[in-house]
């Protein structure tokens, strides 16, 4: 066998085994059970943590509670697999504290705190195709 052909074959098989080139677009929105977006999550984050491997994908949350997941750079998508989902509220604004002023209190978390841990969120998603309208339904805080 030609040495170059053998090297190409090994590289192709290795790439296929780790899933290179097979990422999917995952876009969605975080909603309450009534279907309304959780708008107070702007600036928070969503993370998909693989159940099967040491892989994760993340996204920030916009003012309409929408997100688009990526692993290394925006737009690179998500590998196929089963994921546990974490949703984190926006971090408090620390600019006043850095300037020596008393910082404002953090905004209240609009969703139950259980969603901020993979052990307690209860949210799981299987990525086996591109998803452009994934809805992550969460319970409001205090329920």
Image (spheres, rainbow, N blue to C red):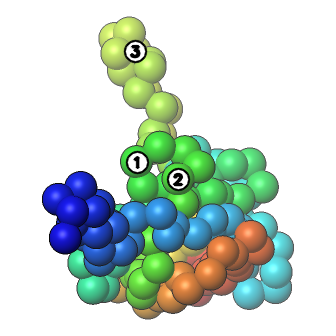
Classify residue 54 by image quadrant. Answer: bottom left
Q: Nearer the viewer, residue 48 or 140?
A: 48
Residue 101 is tagged as: 3
Q: Helix, strand or loop at disc 3?
A: loop
Count residues near mark 3 (Cα–Cα under 10 Å), then give few for <14, some for 14-19, many for 20+: few
User: How far, Cα to Cα, is label 1 from label 3?
Assistant: 36 Å
Image position of 125 with respect to 43: above or below = below
Indicate left or right for 85 with 30 as reference: left
Q: Tag 2 or tag 3, which sits nearer the N-term?
A: 2
Residue wearing tag 1: 72
**Left or right, residue 85 beside residue 3:** right
Q: Is residue 93 above or below residue 61?
A: above
Task: Please state which of the two labelled residues, at mark 3 or mark 2, is closer to the viewer.
Answer: 2
Image quadrant occupied by the C terminus: bottom right
Q: Residue at x 66, y 74 (%)?
A: 130
**In front here: 24 or 83?**
24
Q: Nearer the viewer, mark 1 or mark 3?
A: 1
């Amino acid at each position: 066998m030609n040495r170059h052909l053998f090297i190409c074959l090994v590289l192709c098989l290795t790439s296929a085994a780790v899933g290179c080139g097979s990422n999917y677009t995952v876009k969605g929105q975080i909603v309450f059970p009534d279907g309304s977006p959780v708008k107070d999550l702007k600036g928070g984050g969503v993370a998909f943590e693989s159940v099967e491997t040491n892989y994760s994908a993340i996204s920030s949350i916009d003012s309409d509670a929408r997100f688009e997941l990526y692993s290394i750079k925006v737009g690179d998508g998500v590998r196929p697999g089963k994921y546990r989902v974490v949703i984190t509220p926006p971090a408090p604004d620390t600019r006043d504290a850095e300037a020596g002023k008393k910082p404002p209190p953090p905004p209240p978390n609009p969703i139950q705190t259980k969603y901020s841990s993979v052990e307690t969120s209860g949210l799981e998603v299987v990525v086996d195709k591109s998803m452009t309208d994934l809805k992550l339904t969460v319970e409001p805080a205090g329920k």
